[in-house]
Amino acid sequence: MKQTIITSILMLLPMLANADPVEIDGIYYILFKKAKQAEVTSKPSYYSGEVSIPKSVTYEGIEYNTTKIGDYAFQDCRDMTSINIPECVTAIGALAFQGCSGITSIIIPEGVTAIGAQAFDQCSGLTSITIPNSVTSIGVYAFSNCI
């Protein structure tokens, strides 16, 4: 049994993401080569102003579709004032925007189905949010401490 689990894990390793995040046009991603998908990842307090996530990115000649805003991706980016999320994004991870007090409004696109726990916790400047019908799961405390 133990050998089977280890073998299964080793077989999955090539399908997993690059070990280190890569920066493409000012945004950090984890790239999933086999699935050709990109997940926005964290770079604490790095992002500021208006941030636009592209529908896809190209790295080393391979195009990756942006499908997720990962856990902690924009955490504590207090100087970020707005975020544009493409419709190809299907999930917003836990604590993704926690502490982004500079954001005043956000429109979650129709493709998103899940919003993680504490995703917008402590977004004290947030006064308007649009959540589409496609969202079927909202994690605990997703909007806690939002005035």
Image: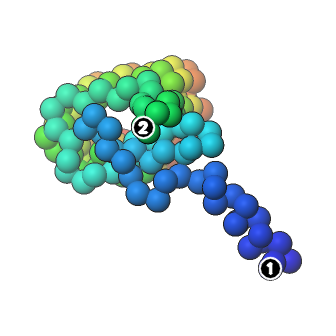
Q: CA distance from mark 2 to mark 1?
A: 37 Å
Left/right placement of residue 10 relative to residue 75 reads right
Mark 2: few/some/many CA within 10 Å (<14, 14-19, 20+): few
The quarter of the displayed image where residue 52 is located: top left
The disc label shown at residue 2, or none = 1
Query: In the depicted view, which residue is nearer to us: 14 or 144?
Result: 14
Left/right placement of residue 82 relative to residue 110 reads left
Q: Quadrant of the C terminus?
A: top left
Mark 1: few/some/many CA within 10 Å (<14, 14-19, 20+): few
Residue 146 in sight in this render: no
The image position of residue 126, as x and y in percent, is 24, 33
Q: Which residue is drawn at the image coordinates 32% and 38% (left, top)?
A: 24
Q: Which is closer to the viewer, label 2 or label 1?
A: 2
The image position of residue 59, as x and y in percent, is 42, 37
Q: Which residue is mark 2?
A: 59
Question: Which numbered disc, 2 or 1, marks the residue that appears first in the sequence?
Answer: 1
Q: Which residue is drawn at the image coordinates 55% and 45% (left, top)?
A: 32
Query: Which element is circle 2 on?
Result: strand
The disc label shown at residue 17, or none = none
Q: Which residue is drawn at the image coordinates 69% and 58% (left, top)?
A: 12
- What's under tag 2, amino acid-wise? Tyr
- What's under tag 1, amino acid-wise? Lys
Q: Which residue is drawn at the image coordinates 50% and 34% (left, top)?
A: 62
The image position of residue 46, as x and y in percent, is 20, 47
Q: In the displayed structure, would residue 123 be above or below residue 44?
A: above
Please say if the residues under marks 2 and 1 sit with CB atoms less than 8 Å apart. Answer: no
The quarter of the displayed image where residue 119 is located: top left
Q: How many marks?
A: 2
Left/right placement of residue 69 relative to residue 44 reads right
Seen as rendered, the residue at the extreme bottom is 2
Query: In the depicted view, which residue is nearer to us: 131 or 111?
Result: 111
- Scheme of colours in the image: rainbow
